[in-house]
Amino acid sequence: MEIQNETILDHKQMFDVAIKQKNMQIFRYVGIALLLFSIFALIYYFIVAKQIGSILLIFFILSAIILFPKKIKRALKKRMEGQPANYKYTFRDDEIEIDLISLMVKESRSTISYQMIDRIEFHQNYFIIYLPSHNWFIVDRNGFPTEADKNSVESFLKQKVKKIKEV
């Protein structure tokens, strides 16, 4: 088997997938905790303490929670310099060859065996291949030459990889 896939990702798509990753979700939980703390502190300072100076602290905490995702998106956009990342995957019987062409990396080639894959998440328009090293690769489900190639690769991956999740 040798089936090719071309996946083109811009900074918005990269951000949408990156923010959903486990290592990024900690920031969500911290953000929610800070938001709840801020609300309780705001109520306390307005009703009980009546201290205006502490409201500034709450304002800065809320600003950080709101601006953090926007800052990541801007950093990705700047790093990609408005140019999409072009991934070319070649699925073979024993490995996946990944060629990346982008302004961020210029050009890179790597090969991963199916035993190296930790898990795969299948989404509506793409699937994500996760490696144990917290690296992941986004594969566009519409980037295959034919529907038969897409189905062939997906069924092959489901046989080769133990952890499969349909999202």
Image: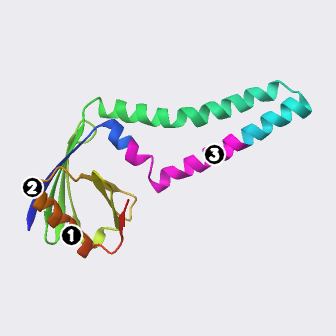
Q: For the residue labelled by badge 1, is the local secondary structure a helix, a strand or a loop?
A: helix
Counting residues from the start of the chain, the first of labels 3 and 2 encountered is: 3
What is the magenta range?
Answer: 16-36
* The quarter of the displayed image where residue 38 is located: top right
Circle 3 packing at 10 Å, graded few (<14), some (14-19), many (20+), is some
Residue 4 drawn at (x, y percent): 11, 56
Side (left or right) of 106 relative to 68: left
Is residue 97 at least partly visible in the picture?
Answer: yes
The residue beneath circle 3 is 32
Does 57 appear in magenta? no
The residue beneath circle 2 is 146
| Depth check, front residue: 120 or 111 | 120
Counting residues from the start of the chain, the first of labels 1 and 3 encountered is: 3
Side (left or right) of 6 relative to 59: left
* The quarter of the displayed image where residue 133 is located: bottom left
| Depth check, front residue: 71 or 105 | 71
On residue 135, which mark appears? none
Q: Where is the C terminus found, in terms of image quarters? A: bottom left
Disc 2 marks a residue whose amino acid type is Thr
Q: For the residue labelled by badge 3, is the local secondary structure a helix, a strand or a loop?
A: helix
**51 over 113 or under it: above or below:** above
Assign the magenta stretch its main secondary structure: helix
Q: CA distance from mark 3 to mark 2?
A: 43 Å
Residue at image point 35% right, 32% down:
77
The type of colouring in the image is rainbow
Residue at image point 17% right, 63% down:
151
The residue beneath circle 1 is 155
Q: CA distance from mark 1 to mark 3?
A: 39 Å
Residue at image point 19% right, 71% down:
156
